Image (cartoon, coloured by chain):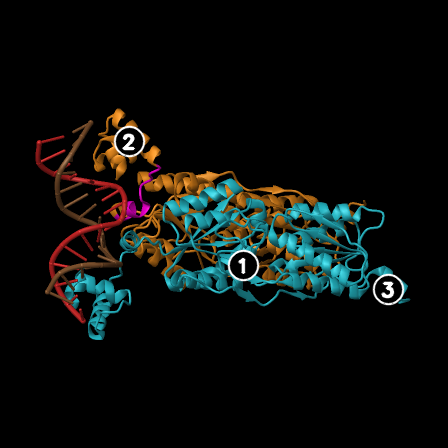
Chain colours: A cyan, B orange, C brown, D red
Amino acid sequence: MDVAKRAGVSKGLVSFALNDRPGVSPESRERILTAARELGWTPSLRARSLSTRRSFALGLVVGRTPEVLGADPFFPSFIAGVESILAPEGRALVLSVVPDEEAELRTYRSLVADGRVDGVFLSDLRHNDPRIPLLVELGLPAVTLGRPEGLTPTDLNPAGRSPFPAVSIDDTVGIAESVRYLAGLGHSRIAHVAGSASMLHGSRRRMAFDDAVRAAGLAECQTIETDFSIGAGAAATRRLLDQDVPPTAIVFANDPMAIAGLGVAHELGLRIPGDLSITGFDDINFARYVYPPLTTVSTTPAQWGRAAARTLLFLMEHGSAEDVDLPAARLTVRGSAGAPASAAIATGT
Amino acid sequence: MDVAKRAGVSKGLVSFALNDRPGVSPESRERILTAARELGWTPSLRARSLSTRRSFALGLVVGRTPEVLGADPFFPSFIAGVESILAPEGRALVLSVVPDEEAELRTYRSLVADGRVDGVFLSDLRHNDPRIPLLVELGLPAVTLGRPEGLTPTDLNPAGRSPFPAVSIDDTVGIAESVRYLAGLGHSRIAHVAGSASMLHGSRRRMAFDDAVRAAGLAECQTIETDFSIGAGAAATRRLLDQDVPPTAIVFANDPMAIAGLGVAHELGLRIPGDLSITGFDDINFARYVYPPLTTVSTTPAQWGRAAARTLLFLMEHGSAEDVDLPAARLTVRGSAGAPASAAIATGT
DNA sequence: CTGAAAGCGCTTACAG
DNA sequence: CTGAAAGCGCTTACAG
């Protein structure tokens, strides 16, 4: 290590100086940093990794099929947000895409066995999510997107409390706003095309929908469960509209399904929003460019990514981190929802 | 290393056995592998990295803004394909998302300085792409998606030949088919909404369009250049349709822009395909669910990812690799293109 | 075919 | 506040 020689100190000192450890005189530190800069020297990440048992990288394991993944801009935006925080910190992101739960759990194990990452982001939380006990067992720090639910209580954790900090965006407000907005326009037969009930945000949005329907004083409204895929959204829309008394409005649990719903409605010759109102969730890029532009709930995945990255870095540095709650996702009104034609008649306009 | 003791050999022998190096008797090898399995021992990736100066990871640096990235399912699918090859090989994927070229080049440098990756995938090739000389300078193996063009010849490389293997999908065939198909339907005013001319696939698709127009014996056809974003696709469509003699068909250089074009056309009250035919490129998931379903060119990003990963692994193992040409992307006919209303009149039907 | 030893390039007690 | 040394856990010539 020429830096040590040039600065006239020992190797150990250089290491201390670079790691901001106490016990280095300001003058020495200055000399060392200058020498390093002049020599263009940067410590070997591999050697640091071996001696510190850290990888200086964070992991994201995405358990989705390529089809669902490709249709949903959540991850690209989320990742861009994560990167904007990690890059300046010299942390890398290790990404895995796995097709099923078995591969998913195997991936976490090998990521740890190989010391590839120092922590992970947990997205798409499920009920009684098996990843949580696994990560506890593996001793891998994590941050969850949203708060886990339904964890099986154990001896060590009798309350079934999440061992990890959560970074959350309340998505129930947006669903409630959607229903309230539609009810306010005069809709009484509002259906919900929900996401997978096994996923927390799927079932949570569904509950929010049911609550909002009750709060609006509407009769029971239909819900169809899907796997969040575009195709499932199209199929669900067809089923809903193919009834004797179809809904006049549909609240979709994500934008890709809502856009597919728009397509089905057009195909059936329905006018939007006159014959059918549609709302989505996420406000993906496409939302404002379809016709009519999609009324949807705007989420901020890049902001979520930034907050999650900050929280995970904080957790790893300090051993614990507070939950963070981002501003709730709110309804963005565009053209795909409006007063039902029947209401217009009823009010005599 | 208990494995050595258990197998009754030296540490070095264990290493030889695990790395398939000659000089280990079959019996010893067997004993060693058995001992390792029984002990659940797996070599430390960090230690291997330090001594072999390899990271056993591959990198992908995506130079796109979150907006463009989020609207384009190419990368998720491509990455899923890459992962399906890397995971079984014990290789990780390090992903970076950067907003501009400066950050992009900086990222490659730090990836190499930190020894994070052993090789990289080069996507979204540009004319005289600055990443190519940079990677040569850094000595980082790479595979390019498509063949680079316009490389500045240097003393070492007078022919301006790419130093890296290319994995390509011919996208000119699909554009040519689109034009031929539209011309065959009776269209004579076909416009092209092209991607960025600074990107190879942007300008290549445009040239293919021009060639096909000439081959069809059509008069000069309009082209508008965009940055591939949805918003730019919408704006270009508006400009095209807002002319005294608008085109009767538009060939879009990607699906997101085509879908935005569909939205604009609907908004203007045009019937698709009667008043306007539209074709896209990529066959993203949305394509078959919009209305009318999009006639587009089907590419196979996951397959591309698999081929690129295989080629890059081969390159790193053997020092060189052949270019690979995947089957050309072909036109998939759906409902968004048809005979122009004027042609129907002209032929008396 | 085998074993003892150096080396990868850091970090970190430990003694001074 | 400083310096010499061991250790992280592998790989790899090198001598036998």
Residue A188 % position (x, y): 81, 59
Cα–Cα span, label 3 and label 1:
40 Å
Relative depth, front residue between A107 and A251: A107
Relative depth, front residue between B125 and B109: B109
Taking B168 as reference, is B200 above or below it? below
Relative depth, front residue between A301 and B332: A301
Q: Which residue is the extreme one toward the bottom?
A: A27
Q: Dot 3: what SS?
A: helix
> Label 3, on which residue?
A344
Q: Are marks 2 and 3 on the same chain?
A: no
- Amino acid carrying label 3: it is Ala
- What stretch of residues is rendered in magenta? B40-50
Badge number at residue B68: 1
Q: Dot 2: what SS?
A: helix
Residue at left offset 28%, top offset 67%: A20
- Crowding at label 1, few (<14), some or many (≥20) Cα neighbours within 10 Å? many
Residue at left offset 40%, top offset 53%: B150
Whether B46 is among the magenta residues is: yes
> Label 2, on which residue?
B32
Left-right relation of A295 to A326 = right
- Amino acid carrying label 2: it is Ile
Residue B246 seen in the current view:
no
Circle 1 chain:
B
Badge number at residue B51: none
Circle 3 chain:
A
Query: Which image quarter is the N terminus of chain A in?
Result: bottom left
Q: Are marks 1 and 2 on the same chain?
A: yes
Residue A307 seen in the current view:
yes
The numbered mark, 1 or 2, whose residue comes first in the sequence reads: 2
